Image (cartoon, rainbow, N blue to C red):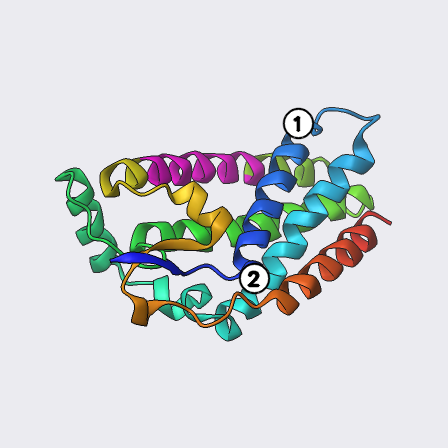
């Protein structure tokens, strides 16, 4: 195997925008003076997640849900291989990581939209409790996802964090994607900027 292009620009850019948005939203969640920063950060998470849904159908090979959303049996088999310290290698997302992504997208949208409703005073205290509960659940999934990335990196001998920066992973040449789709990444940036600002306005 050799280094091949696996992650397109929209996947990589969207990933790190969600990471930054979630961290910033969490850090500013209790600050009234930084409320706008909190809302913009949450809006970024929502906007990226909403972009990622259609991109999961029209994006490059490993960005598509059909490539990494597997049934329970595949997830169990992968987790067993992880416990044996001999995990199956997947060019794209592994089955467990795939479901973590689905959960994070869903939780990101739900948490952000509930937060938007709070920001616009569309509900009572129950919305605040729901928002906090969703955010806490998302944080839990994030920790599990990070643990999976670390264990996968160590067991595969491949830096998965760096792969999400460079777009390159180990694989056979015929499995590489033909393009990093830079124009779609530009659209993502414009969409995130416009959508997050609208949500905060």
Which mark, residue 27? 1
Of residues 11 and 141, the one nearer the viewer is 11
Q: Is residue 138 one of those drawn in magenta?
A: yes
**Rendered view: 41 above or below 7:** above
State which tag comes first along the sequence, 2 or 1.
Answer: 1
Left or right of 166? Residue 14 is right
The kind of secondary structure element at disc 2 is helix
Which mark, residue 52? 2
Of residues 98 and 176, the one nearer the viewer is 176
Residue drawn at (56%, 41%) of the image: 134
Q: Position of residue 19 (x, y in %)?
A: 57, 41
From the image, give the main secondary structure of the stretch colored magenta: helix
Q: Is residue 27 one of those drawn in magenta?
A: no
Q: Where is residue 84 in the image (x, y as percent from the top left)?
A: 12, 40
Residue drawn at (25%, 54%) of the image: 75
Residue drawn at (35%, 62%) of the image: 68
Of residues 183 and 69, the one nearer the viewer is 183
Magenta part of the chain: 134-150
Residue drawn at (51%, 62%) of the image: 8
């Amino acid at each position: 195997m050799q280094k091949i292009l696996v992650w397109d620009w929209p996947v990589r850019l969207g990933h790190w925008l969600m990471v930054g948005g979630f961290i910033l939203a969490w850090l500013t969640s209790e600050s009234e003076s930084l409320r706008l920063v909190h809302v913009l950060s949450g809006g970024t998470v929502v906007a990226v997640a909403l972009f990622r849904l259609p991109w999961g159908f029209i994006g490059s090979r490993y960005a598509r849900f059909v490539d990494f959303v597997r049934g329970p049996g595949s997830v169990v088999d992968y987790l067993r291989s992880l416990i044996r310290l001999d995990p199956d290698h997947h060019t794209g997302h592994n089955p467990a990581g795939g479901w973590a992504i689905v959960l994070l997208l869903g939780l990101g949208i739900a948490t952000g939209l509930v937060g938007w409703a709070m920001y616009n005073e569309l509900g009572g205290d129950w919305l605040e409790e729901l928002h906090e509960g969703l955010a806490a659940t998302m944080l839990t999934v994030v920790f599990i996802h990070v643990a999976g990335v670390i264990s996968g990196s160590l067991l595969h001998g491949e830096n998965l964090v760096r792969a999400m920066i460079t777009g390159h992973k180990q694989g056979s040449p015929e499995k590489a994607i033909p393009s990093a789709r830079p124009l779609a990444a530009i659209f993502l940036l414009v969409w995130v900027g416009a959508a997050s600002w609208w949500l905060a306005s």
